[in-house]
Image (cartoon, rainbow, N blue to C red):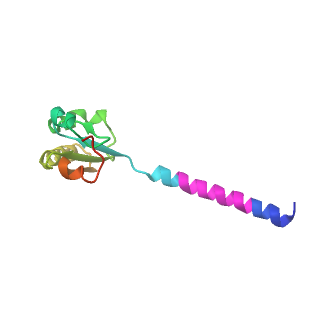
């Protein structure tokens, strides 16, 4: 095998290694997002966003540890109209969950996200 072939092979192997390292770094940078439906269990059973966990807004502080105890986690909250998810967001922020976001109402969200109904 000539030097040019060996050098080309080494360069290709190095390029693949760098590419894989880059992919690994990007995979690690992907942020987990916890999707929480703060409506009642009855409302949740009638349809919800795929991947959502149901915690009634009145119980969000008491039950959030069942989903995540990471105070830096991205938490997306929704309800029917956005009012209860706003209350839940404020409650979580008061307990240190600074990345909790009120993403609005179910009917609007189901137009752009997968839902069970």
Give the number of marks: 0
Please tell me which residue lies in front, 100 or 71. 100
The image shows residue 81 at horizontal and vertical percentages of 13, 49
Q: Quadrant of the N terminus?
A: bottom right
Quarter occupied by the C terminus? top left
Q: Residue at x 18, y 49 (%)?
A: 107
Q: Is residue 102 in view from this perspective? A: no
Residue 79 left/right relative to 28:
left
- From the viewer's perspective, is 33 left or right of 46? right
On the image, which quarter does residue 10 sit in?
Answer: bottom right
Decide which of 81, 114 is in the foreground and name it: 114
Question: In the rendered structure, does residue 5 fall within the stretch colored magenta?
Answer: no
> What x and y, as percent, mark residue 99?
28, 50
- Residue 100, visible in the rendered structure: yes
Q: Position of residue 75 (x, y in %)?
A: 29, 46
Instruction: Tell me where the magenta segment starts and ends, as one range.
Output: 10-24
Main SS of the magenta segment? Answer: helix
Q: Per the image, is 18 magenta?
A: yes
Residue at 54% across / 51% down in the picture? 24
Q: Nearer the viewer, residue 42 or 102?
A: 42
Left or right of 42, for residue 10: right
In the displayed image of the protein, which residue is found farthest to the bottom?
4
At 87% from the left and 64% from the top, the residue drawn is 2
Q: Quadrant of residue 44?
A: top left
Seen from the viewer's position, the closer of residues 73 and 117 is: 117
Farthest-out residue, front: 117
Left or right of 113? Residue 102 is left
Where's residue 114, x and y in %?
30, 47
């Amino acid at each position: 095998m000539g030097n040019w072939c060996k050098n080309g092979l080494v360069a290709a192997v190095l390029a693949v290694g760098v590419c894989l390292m880059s992919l690994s770094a990007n995979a690690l940078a992907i942020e987990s997002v916890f999707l929480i439906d703060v409506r009642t269990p009855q409302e949740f059973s009638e349809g919800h966003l795929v991947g959502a966990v149901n915690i009634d807004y009145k119980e969000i502080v008491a039950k959030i540890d069942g989903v995540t105890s990471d105070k830096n986690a991205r938490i997306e909250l929704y309800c029917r109209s956005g009012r209860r998810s706003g209350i839940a967001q404020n409650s979580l922020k008061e307990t240190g969950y600074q990345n909790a976001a009120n993403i609005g109402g179910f009917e609007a969200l189901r137009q752009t996200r997968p839902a069970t109904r």
